[in-house]
Image (tube, rainbow, N blue to C red):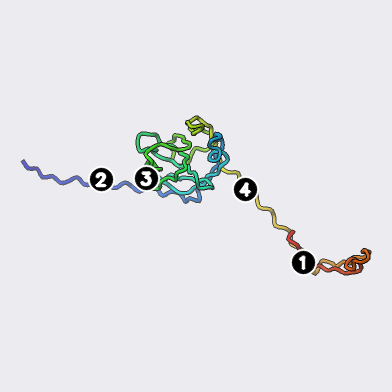
Amino acid sequence: DLTLARPSPPPPPSPPAPPSPPLATVLPFVITGGCADERAVLDGVEYTAAGYTASGAPYYRDSSSLYYIYWDPNCNAGSEPAAWIVSPKQPSTSASSDLDGDGQCKFIAYIDSEDSSSPPLGTNTWRVLCDGSFTDNDLTLARPSPSPPPSPPAPPSPPLATVLPFVITGGCSGQPVLDGVEYAAAGYTAS
């Protein structure tokens, strides 16, 4: 028996992901508390938003552009949980998982997290590579202190015409510039 049937229609396309917020609105943070091995990466280092990964999560870079913090849904494209990762490798902006593309979970520090909007602020226990093995390490992520306000501008200097001339008298002999010569203002120094 021959049966004719219409093919099933393809499923509707997935709705597009909501747009990521403008990068300028993603606030920087300072990370502190790293072990001695990773002090240059994890202690007193400011990270600023550098872009977005394919999931829409922001990723961050330190000022030296040598280290990154990013959210990876699965660091080895296997069964690892989602986590925020500190790595010297820049994350892919097109891969859906294993954002460093190495098929492994190799990094400096991580914290498991389902929240892709930001690494957890405040003090939290991260797993940090210290002395060759991962150990629990309390890291603090906080917004940087605001810059001090700029110094007020120096008051304007008075017009040179209002600066009165003066005469030096009583100078020693042999120094005619120090006896009876009138001096008038000619300009201002930088101070």
The residue that label 1 is drawn on is 187
160 relative position to 34: left or right: right
Q: Earlier in the sequence, mark 4 or mark 1?
A: 4
- Secondary-structure class at tag 4: loop
The residue that label 2 is drawn on is 11
- Secondary-structure class at tag 3: loop
The reply to whether residue 111 is visible in this rendering is yes
174 relative position to 135: left or right: right
Which residue is painted at 77% across and 64% down in the image? 158
Using the numbered discs, state the Cα–Cα distance from disc 2 to disc 3 in whole angstroms.
23 Å
Can you tell which mark lies on residue 13? none
Cβ–Cβ below 8 Å for labels 2 and 3?
no
The crowd level at tag 3 (other Cα within 10 Å; few <14, some 14-19, many 20+) is some
The reply to whether residue 27 is visible in this rendering is no
The residue that label 4 is drawn on is 147
Residue 146, compared with residue 168, is above or below; it is: above
Using the numbered discs, state the Cα–Cα distance from disc 3 to disc 1 in whole angstroms.
64 Å
**Mark whose residue sits in front, 4 or 3:** 3
Image quarter for residue 155? bottom right
Residue type highlighted by circle 3:
Ala
Can you tell which mark lies on residue 95? 3
Residue type highlighted by circle 4:
Ser
